Image (cartoon, rainbow, N blue to C red):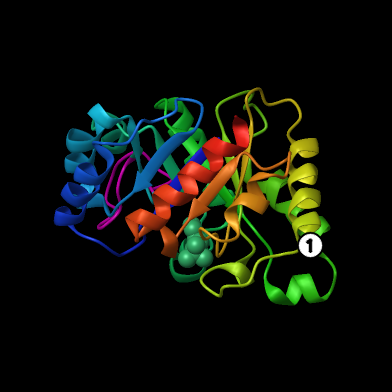
Amino acid sequence: MLIAGNWKMNLKYEDIIKLKNIISDLEVDRRVEIAIFPQFPLLYSAIEKLSDYKIEVGAQACSSVLKGAFTGDVSVEIISDIGCKYCIVGHSERREYHHETNQFVKNASNLLLSKNIIPIVCVGESLEVKNKRETNQFIKSQIRECIPENITSNIVVAYEPIWAIGTGKIPEYEEISSVHKIIMNELSHIKNLKVIYGGSVNKENCSKIFELNEVHGALIGGASLKFKDFLAIYESAVKQII
Ligand code: 13P
């Protein structure tokens, strides 16, 4: 399982130190991986301070090209050089505010894999698509358009329904299972595929989500900013695999 904390545009250097102090007493169970995704300028410090505690660090986004005149963008080469294991690609906030398309996600995923970084590819339907009962078809198309055809291992897909992000609402548990199954069927050729769920995961609802066989972890926004809650979610994942 993978418990990933997407800090988005929140928290500071001092919070990395706070997290380090909190986790120094924690026995990390290797079967459940913890990863955090701070803002770019904090990545190096996060890796330096947290690697002894078996916390992985990843980037929240990357460019879809390797280098050049792209002011403000960040290359996968740098993300790889500093030692990130993961990079989130195609988060709905990037799709909405930075116009990242499915083709962008595919190009970026290819580049990430070429630099040995595991892409966490985000997919998920809007409320409009859900209300039209077109979720399954929408997710299938997103997967086909976002995941490079040649990939055979080392990818994580995060199912994040847009309407569930930051709203306190989550799909019915059967709906989560059924969308994860669709993703797993589409990508049955990929070894070690992880399909994780994101959208209003908290310490109260996480255990029911982790009970679902098709859920291999969570991508957590708001609740990852409160470290006690984040670690409670991690502990719930550990209980699930024991
Ligand atoms: P919330 O957990 O705040 O709903 O955010 C989910 C998310 O967008 C994680 O990437």
Reply yes or no: does residue 51 show up in magenta.
Answer: no
Does any portion of residue 148 appear in the rendered image?
yes
Q: Which amino acid is tagged 1?
A: Thr
Q: Is residue 132 left or right of residue 82?
A: right
Residue ID at (51%, 38%): 2
Q: Nearer the viewer, residue 237 or 52?
A: 237
Q: Which residue is mark 1?
A: 135
Q: Is residue 5 left or right of residue 68?
A: right
The yes-or-no answer for disc 1 within 8 Å of ligand 1 is no
Is residue 119 depicted above or below 89 in this figure?
A: above
**Badge 1: residue crowd in 10 Å (few <14, some 14–19, many ≥20):** many
Is residue 221 depicted above or below 32 in this figure?
A: below
- Give the quarter of the figure containing the N terminus: top right
Query: SS class of the residue under badge 1?
Result: helix
Residue ID at (51%, 34%): 110
Residue ID at (73%, 54%): 176
Give the magenta part as a residue range.
Answer: 62-75
